Amino acid sequence: MSELIQIIYISRATFEAGPRENGVEPHVARILLKSRKNNPRQGLVGVLFYGDGNFFQCIEGERSAVEALFSRISDDPRHKDVRVLSVRDIEVRTFNEWSMKYVPAAREVMSRVKAFGFDTFDPYLFNEDHVKEMLTLLQRISDPTLGRLNSTSPPPGEAHDFMGLTYLALAIATLALAVSCINLAMTMEWL
């Protein structure tokens, strides 16, 4: 069995935040699109939070894939001051349903940050308990970008976002209902 790990890191954006498109800052949207396209191929999953110019990200997967991705992330010029908060072995992926879940600067997160005693989202001030609480909170909050930022479908059996499958199931159910109605109409000789 492969060795799974989880890495949590933080960093500061090097870009000026632009106007939000579909509720997401444009630079962050490009990061998400690329992550959602490439992560399933590597068996990687995770969550990304961006607020007040800072990133908080958790990545999970096989050790070699996580380490390779983190190496590329560390060299990405869109952020600086990359700091690893946690690396640990895991038995199962926490964000298994997400090639890269995105949580915007949601009210729940900012409320939690205020409860930590901070005025803004600055993960460089977090202690170990703050990191754990943040991760738990990000697991609970829904991703408003589903269906809007997914560019490709992952290979079968890989981690993925489920919005496309939901639409497919809805289309099949609608088609089945239409066929049943036509059958009933023909049986009753209404047609």
Image (cartoon, rainbow, N blue to C red):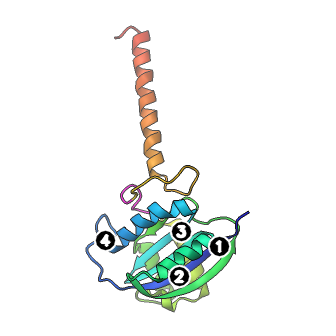
Task: Look at the image and tell me in which quarter the N terminus lies.
Answer: bottom right
Disc 2 designates what residue? 9
Q: Amino acid at mark 2?
A: Tyr
Instruction: Name the residue tied to disc 3.
Output: 46
Gap between marks 4 and 3, in whole Å?
A: 20 Å
Residue found at the very far top of the displayed protein: 189
Q: Is residue 35 above or below residue 132?
A: above
Question: Which stretch did the figure color magenta?
Answer: 142-149
Q: CA distance from mark 4 to mark 2?
A: 21 Å
Per the image, label 3 sits on a secondary structure element best described as strand
Residue 188 x, y percent position in the rendering: 41, 9
The residue at which mark 4 appears reads as 26
Q: CA distance from mark 2 to mark 1?
A: 13 Å
Which element is circle 1 on? strand
Mark 1, residues whose alpha carbon is within 10 Å: few (<14), some, or many (≥20)? many
Looking at the image, tell me whether mark 4 or mark 3 is earlier in sequence order: 4
- Is 103 placed above or below 175 here? below
Question: What residue is rendered at 56% in x and 65% in y?
Answer: 44
